[in-house]
Amino acid sequence: MTEPGEFVPGRPGDPEYETATRVFNLAAPVHPAAAVTARSVDQVRAAVRHAAAAGLRVRMFTSGHGAGAARPMPEALLIRTELGGGVEVDPAGRVARVPAGTRAGELVAATAKHGLTSAHGSSANVGLVNYLLGGGLSGYGRFAGLAVNGVRAVELVTADGEARRVDAAHDPELFRALRGGGGGFGVVTAVELALFPAGQLFGGATYWRGELAEAVLARWNAWTAGAPREVTAGLRLLNLPAVPGVPPALAGSTTICVDGLVRAASTGEAHRVADTLLRPLYALGEPLADTWQDLTPEGVLGIHMDPPEPVPFLGEHHLLSTLDDRGEAALLGLLGPGSGSPFVGAGLRQLGGAFATAPAGAGVLGHLDAAFSFAASGVPDPTGPERLLAHGAKARVALEPWRTGRTVPNFVEHFEQPQRHLDADQVAEVDRVRLRVDPEGLFRDDIAPNATALS
């Protein structure tokens, strides 16, 4: 695309096609019939109208992180949204307008100048639209709740090719459905997102050798039961390869990591809250590495050491209601030293706190009724993904007593994996909205498999 509103679809082999279909997950390439990168609302409108006239379904990408969860798209036009204009911040109103295609790092840089931040994810290069509308588990989550609850308005192009802006006062049914409804409503071109004061931040990650995994897991799990809302912590079992970017002390064997973020009113309070978590863990043994420190809002994005460049990966995800002694043993049997786990990283994200409560006026997905989010990910063998898929299925069985049966859309990495984030009444509710705004089903293939009863 070159001029505003001009539409030139890319076909396989065209440079435009290759650019538009580029994904972050190299294990999940996409192969639509045609693809285009839209850089303006007019270009999105032109692309939607072209698809309707050509008999193609519409599929969407922002940064391509959701490729693994996308259904095949052989008879579709893929629209990659990279809209210009940049992040607009209203510091007095504590709101940011975020064009589709914006990455988390861009938002954090723009809001930090005003001492503000948002419930963004752990990686600087994740696209914000899919992350937000799919729920969004943030390091600020036990204080701020699901990231989707911060969305104040959504701008989108619907199946008729018209641009709309919806919020609590303008088409509230569509606004509710967009927030966690699983897609299929149109091409989102921007969101307005609530901000909050960054406060004093303290966070990082501590790593121990795998031999301490049982003791670290038990002590961390016990701490989570009474943890204050100012802190959101996670636990990971890692089998990191010896590659550039991985500290040598952490490569080549199983390690266990406890990471987290504290947001408090003062530095002293942030340190005190972190001490409730870290002091009992430090007593277990000398860490291999420790990065906990006072942070700027930009520094929060470095806690997880997520890969900055595209990589191949495949994994497993579930929500867990709790984890008792038997659950801890099951987790270590799957992922701990000597387990033979093919996952590079696997572990638990602490929920509860504000994650467990839907605020007034929330979208269809406003809270999570679970204690932990379990996620595991690894690099498929060159011969295929079978080993990872088999271990994921093994994890499903082993963790069955503690699984809630629910998932978070952001963490599903393959469209055929078990997933469910809405109940039957919610599915019926969002389907009614889809039928109103897209009666011909132009976007129907773009819906999360668990989020619709439409064929």
Image (cartoon, rainbow, N blue to C red):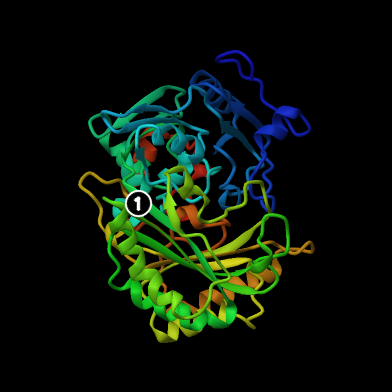
At 71% from the left edge and 62% from the top edge, which residue is drawn?
Answer: 380
Relative placement, left or right, of 50 versus 34 is left
Q: Residue furthest top?
A: 3
* Residue 154 visible in the displayed image: no
Q: In this figure, what is the number of numbered marks? A: 1
Say above or below: 135 vs 242. Answer: above
Residue 300 appears at what percent x and percent y? 46, 49
Q: Secondary structure at mark 1?
A: loop
Which amino acid, by three-letter code, is at mark 1? Leu
In which quadrant of the rendered view does residue 154 lie?
top left
Foreground residue, 184 or 217? Answer: 217
Q: Residue furthest left?
A: 360
Q: Residue furthest front?
A: 268
Relative placement, left or right, of 360 versus 438 is left
In which quadrant of the rendered view does residue 113 lie?
top left
In the picture, the quarter occupied by the N terminus is top right
Residue 435 appears at what percent x and percent y? 38, 38
In which quadrant of the rendered view does residue 174 lie?
top left
From the image, tell me which residue sits under label 1: 146
At 64% from the left edge and 67% from the top edge, which residue is drawn?
Answer: 250
Foreground residue, 166 or 148? Answer: 148
Residue 372 appears at what percent x and percent y? 40, 67
Relative placement, left or right, of 217 versus 251 is left
